[in-house]
Image: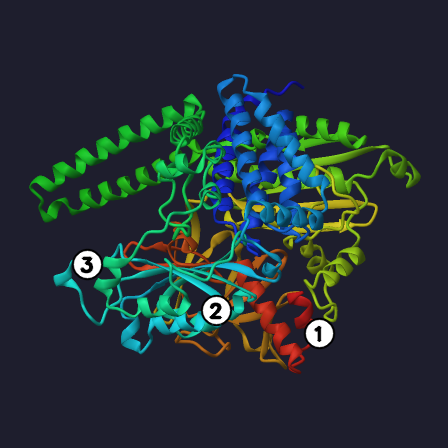
Amino acid sequence: MSIDLSQFIPTFLEESFEGLELMETSLLGLDQGDSETINAIFRAAHSIKGGAGTFGFEAVAEFTHLVETLLDEMRDGRRTITESGVELLLESVDCMRLLIEAIRDDTSCETSKINEVAQQLENALNQDSVTTDANDSAAVTIEDSNATSATAGLVKWQIQFIPEHHLVQTGNDPILLFSALTELGEVTVECDGKNLPSLEDIDAEEVYLEWHITLVGDTDEEQIREIFEWVEDECVLIITQAPLTETTNVVEGKNNNDCTEELAVNNADIHANSVAKTPDARQVTAISTGNTAQATAPEILNQNAVENPIQPEPVSSSNLPNNTNSQSTTASKGKADAGSIRVGVDKVDSLINLVGELVITQSMLSELGTDFELSKVEKLSAGLEQLLQNTKELQESVMRIRMLPISFAFNRFPRLVHDLEKKTGKVIDLITYGEQTELDKTVMEQIGDPLIHLVRNAVDHGIEPADVRLSKGKSEKGQVVLNAYHQGGSIVIEISDDGSGINREAVFNKAKEKGIIDGNSPLTDAQVFDLVFEPGFSTAAQVSDISGRGVGMDVVKKNIQALGGRIQVESTIDVGTTFKINLPLTLAILDGQLVRVGTETYIIPLITIVESLQTQIEHINRVSGNMVLYRLREDNVPVIPIYQLFNIEADTTNVEHALLVVVEADGQKIGLLVDDLLAQQQVVIKSLKDNYQQVEGISGATILGDGSVAMILDIPGMINMALKTAQYNQGHGQHYHQESAGVLQ
């Protein structure tokens, strides 16, 4: 079957440009030991490489593989993050952008620059990290005639100190902090008075200044932070390590003591006498694009690339010289390409008919409102009922417009598997089911990358080589199966292979070796298999450009959870592995059951509810560890009082003759103790994470008809909370009946 992959290229381009922007911005603010930032840069590069490989853009994939490998060494601590290394990565981002822009514009790009940077990447990778550090040190010695062997063991720190206005009112004095810093090494201080108000508006008890400090000494970040620990809640403190290029003990011709004395003046005097230091060329190029880095120091300074060696915020690539036009063009083209959707004519016709019905209903209600009388109440009620029906149908029709067959996501994999067969030498048969199962466009776009990771993982880790399969009595051709189907109000996507399965012991031992688990607590198979989603976890013996770097699986889980979904792993040795993803059909609407607990209203997703019932005393079983089980036919269901979980007052605190809503997720059941069952209705989901922060047991919020806010319960999260509570009680000697442990595990 011939598949046209070109329809997916605009999405790849948009995501790639976003990834490049993230890489560039993060590189500009990259610090030694900043693991979260380096991981984010690495994931962006890995996603670009994976997408490029899918669509056959070999030049992008091969070049990005070099970048990714260098980043991999940095994030694992095998290579020190140096200024020269960051500069090389920034130039690499420029080259990646040139390659992707050439794809977007269907043109060729200059290969000499790309080849040159690729050679530099290869040279860097061929050097051992220790050798690289030694070469960097030698280069510094040549560039800086003032540097001597006395610099051994010294570290250069850049400190940005922005106190809150009321700092001195709490008895703290910045001058004393700077004086304490001088005990750690040689200190250089710059004062920034850009926020000083006019003279008549100055309050003598307020601090309006910011300070940029350079400290050179045999010290570490923890010692610096100890000096500022008394004011850490009353300031912005940014500490970064910088390359040690020179040592000096003067500031504007003064020694450290003179500097301290000079700072001990009032705010107005400091502002009047503060001098903006000129950044050296190395500092400027560290936050500039590849083009700017090639300019001489005077040219860079004339471009006003920076005003201070330390930037209070990461520098946006859109603000950098020689790059603005390129970035704006990229952004506009990417967004334009991604702003369309194919809609069937029948769906459009349905919308038009519904709009017509709404117009008729609106006209009728307007006429009733002109000269309203009590005799028209019945007609008004009928009109409102019709309006409600039309609105509901319109909502469903609009949602259907956003629904696309999952074949849009599945169609990219035949080419991917075909290419992987060539790289691995394996023989693989890709089988797909449920291609016409529809999914919301937003969900479809965000699930693409996790699916790519899982398919690549199945091919590289799951399927054995042909000779190994034959020795096990299997067919030499391995199978990767993609299946999608609706289940209630959600969609289930399964990625299965008939390979070697997951070695439980290998995963357990690797997790213990990495310190992810202590190895003393017993874990179920499901809990062990869930460890493969830990960041940086991998049991691959060799690293390839397909997988095995310990990246991807953690991204898979994060992306799925961000969509309100969950992922499960089932595996049997020499039989195969299945990754099962449950996703909501849409991110906007939820069918929910409203329940009341005390004065609070909560929403339980309708698809998770098994049944609601009035408890009976004879079915209640109290066990040690403060656990209550309710016998529901053949199951012992743990009872979770919502009022205890969220620390609120409730009308009903006794489980006897109470209302119990039995819910199920991931094959596990719990009973939620509530005060009252209210209505069932569709609600519009509002993200709690975007507007506040993620709360365990809560998946989002909604606004009810009366204007009040109701929380949407995250049933898998609540089950997880119940499991943690049970394990905690068990670990503290509150052993409960074996049946209860079995239910939650």
Q: Which residue is mark 1?
A: 738
Decide: few, some or many residues near mark 2? Use Cα within 10 Å; few <14, some 14-19, many ≥20.
Answer: some
Q: Amino acid at mark 3?
A: Pro
Pointer 2: what residue?
Answer: 225
Is 141 placed left or right of 278 in the picture?
Answer: right
Along the line of sight, the residue nearer the viewer: 95 or 513: 95
Q: Position of residue 373 (x, y in %)?
A: 8, 46
Q: Position of residue 398 (x, y in %)?
A: 38, 34
**Discs 3/1, front:** 3
Report helix, strand or loop for mark 2.
helix
Q: Residue at x 62, y 25 (%)?
A: 57
Q: CA distance from mark 3 to mark 2?
A: 30 Å
Q: Which residue is mark 3?
A: 197
Mark 2: amino acid: Arg
Say left or right for 732 vs 653: right
Answer above or below: position of 651 versus 271. below
Q: Earlier in the sequence, mark 3 or mark 2?
A: 3
* Placement of the N terminus among the 4 image quadrants: top right
- The numbered disc on residue 329 is none
The answer to which image quadrant residue 739 occupies is bottom right
Disc 1 residue type (three-letter): Gln
Label 1 CA crowd tier, 10 Å (few <14, some 14–19, many 20+) = few
Badge 1 element: helix
Relative vertical location of residue 568 with respect to residue 730 in this rendering, above or below: above
The reply to whether the C-beta atoms of the residues labelled 3 and 2 are less than 8 Å apart is: no
Gap between marks 1 and 2, in whole Å? Answer: 49 Å
Q: Secondary structure at mark 3?
A: loop
- Examine the rendered structure and indicate whether residue 707 appears above or below residue 256: above
Quadrant assignment for the C terminus: bottom right
Q: CA distance from mark 3 to mark 1?
A: 69 Å
Identity of the residue drawn at 41% across and 42% down:
316
- Residue 65 drawn above or below residue 550: above
